[in-house]
Amino acid sequence: MNNRITKTIEKYNMIANGDRVLVACSGGADSMLLLQYFLDIKDKYNLNVSVAHIEHGIRGQESVSDSEFVRAFCEDNNVPFHILQIDAVKESEKLGLGVEEYSRQRRYAFFDSIACDKIATAHNLSDNVETLLFRLCRGTGIKGACAIPPVRGKIIRPLIEISSDDVRAYCDNHKIAYRIDSTNASNDYTRNYIRNIVIPDLMNINSDFETAVSNFISDINQDTDFIYSYSNDVYDKVLVDNKLDISLLKKYDMSIIKRVIIKYFNSYDIKLDRLHLNSVLTLLNHNGRIQICGAYYAVSDNGYIRFADFSQKEKNFAFVSKILKISELDKKSVDFYCDYDKIIGKINIRQRQAGDKIRPANRNCIKSLKKLFNELKIPQETRDSVPIATDDKGVIGIVGYCVDERVKIDVNTKKILSLRLPSEDC
């Protein structure tokens, strides 16, 4: 058995000489075999082995007895022992999470709180098969079909190629003591139902069912690695100024397009479900926007798909004004300027407002700011951040873009009003 485990460890390069290995040990057959394995090899690889155990508070005295069993084993073998005690049922209810999901989150947070180089968990081949079937029943893509990875960060799973039946048989034959979780016999939990009912039925069709599924998982992992590597290369090619170039993106197969879009929105911490992904895909063929969540949208315009945040942000613009002669005007050092004598009343800088219009200098037309912003290709979600210069009569300019015909500088101009908006770091 140790040779089989070592082959898996070497295959996936799970440990290095001198590693501090934290073994997640529940007291069950899988984790006790795993712990015994690391005790057997620790001198060979110069490992520092410790144990983490979680008492979930679900099975009463039985659960407490499991903890004492693991603690006693660690004391007898001089293994550092770390324990976390929770009330998974009550605590998960308060957070609105399922007991299994809450327990998983607390479990890995606890592991991460302990100094180590590797976290060894006892997931085995049978667990991997259950996970695949569970995800297929709930709905998944090829990423989900990869099931439980042998290595994820510093988490390693040395038993991932060994079935639970082989684990228990080895423990029984070699007198490795372990605890039995009474809830494993209950089919109230979905995973238990898959383990106790579904998989045995499938093994009636193929007695080597678990191995067949393991081979499938291995193949799908290899294919997925290639697809995502290729998708990442495409992503780098089509990402232009934090936007996705539609014409470039559409040159690729839909399988790649989907993964590029998912990766793009992941960069904004947005996880696209299947419904929203399909909605975003429609933006490949027309301009528009799709609401993803709250004020977050996917927008297609000017040949690009991009992320947009439409949350309303009140903005106050501070500005510095000066009255200059024409000879003193340095256009590089000002954000907006106009004929001072043509201003009516008080100067103000504000956000755009409904109904705002402007007559851009030298264009002989009147435009709403909405139409002008469209012409200027100013992203919709940033338009409230564009400073609008006004006097008592109305809009006199869009700072950084244009001045109104009414206040433009001409041959008769004697005094110039210059405005500068200090940057945030000034």
Image (cartoon, rainbow, N blue to C red):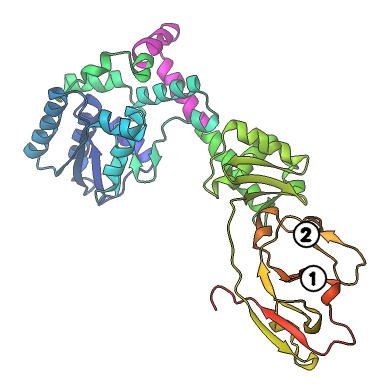
Establish if 154 lies above or below 158. Answer: below
Q: Is residue 1 visible?
A: no
Residue span colored magenta: 195-220
The answer to which image quadrant residue 12 occupies is top left
Could you say which is closer to the camera, residue 354 or residue 170?
Answer: 354
Q: Is residue 198 visible?
A: yes
Establish if 406 lies above or below 212. Answer: below
Q: Dot 1, crowdedness within 10 Å: few (<14), some or many (≥20)?
A: some
Residue 229 screen position, x and y as percent: 57, 44
The answer to which image quadrant residue 89 occupies is top left
Residue tagged by mark 2?
A: 369
Q: Residue at x 35, y 16 (%)?
A: 195
Is label 1 in a helix, a strand or a loop? strand
* 258 displayed left or right of 60: right
Establish if 199 lies above or below 141. Answer: above
Could you say which is closer to the camera, residue 336 or residue 71?
Answer: 336
Magenta segment main secondary structure: helix
Is label 2 in a helix, a strand or a loop? helix
Residue 32 screen position, x and y as percent: 20, 30
